[in-house]
Amino acid sequence: MEELEQNQTLLSRLKSFILESRRVFRITKRPSKDEFKAIVKISSIGIALIGIIGFIIQIIWRLAS
């Protein structure tokens, strides 16, 4: 009996998630070419900065030991 209730709860949560996801996809729009280029540029700069910081930390760590 309890297992049946858990399955129903799981199914209702899954259905709710699917409905919410569909609503979000309907509301969102594709970025324009300029927006996409800006997003790629900013993301690339962020990834490069994280890589540079990690590289600097690695160099300092190796020099310290």
Image: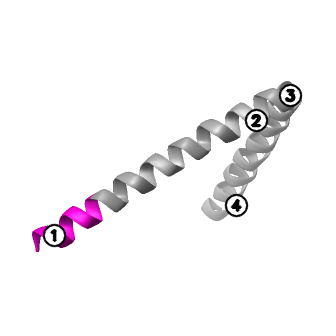
- Could you give the CA–CA distance between mark 2 and mark 1, rounded to whole angstroms? 39 Å
Residue 12: within the magenta? no
- Could you give the CA–CA distance between mark 4 and mark 2, rounded to whole angstroms? 50 Å
Query: Which image quadrant: the N terminus?
Result: bottom right
Residue 60: within the magenta? yes
Q: In the rendered structure, which amino acid carries the disc numbered 1?
A: Leu
From where the camera sits, is residue 43 visible? yes
Mark 3 surroundings within 10 Å by alpha-carbon count, few (fewer than 14), some (14 through 19), many (20 or more): few
User: Label for residue 4?
Assistant: 4
- Do the residues under discs 4 and 2 have CB atoms within 8 angstroms? no
Colour scheme of this structure image?
one colour
Magenta residues, start to end: 57-65
- Do the residues under discs 4 and 3 have CB atoms within 8 angstroms? no
- Could you give the CA–CA distance between mark 2 and mark 3, rounded to whole angstroms? 9 Å
Q: Secondary structure at mark 3?
A: loop
What residue is disc 3 on?
A: 32
What residue is disc 1 on?
A: 63
> Hey, which quadrant is residue 27 in on the image?
top right
Tell which tag, 2 or 3, sits nearer the viewer.
2
Q: In the rendered structure, which amino acid carries the disc numbered 3?
A: Ser
Q: From what the image shows, is residue 55 above or below residue 9?
A: below
Q: Position of residue 10 (x, y in %)?
A: 68, 53
Q: Secondary structure at mark 4?
A: helix
Residue 3 or residue 13, whichever sits in front: 13
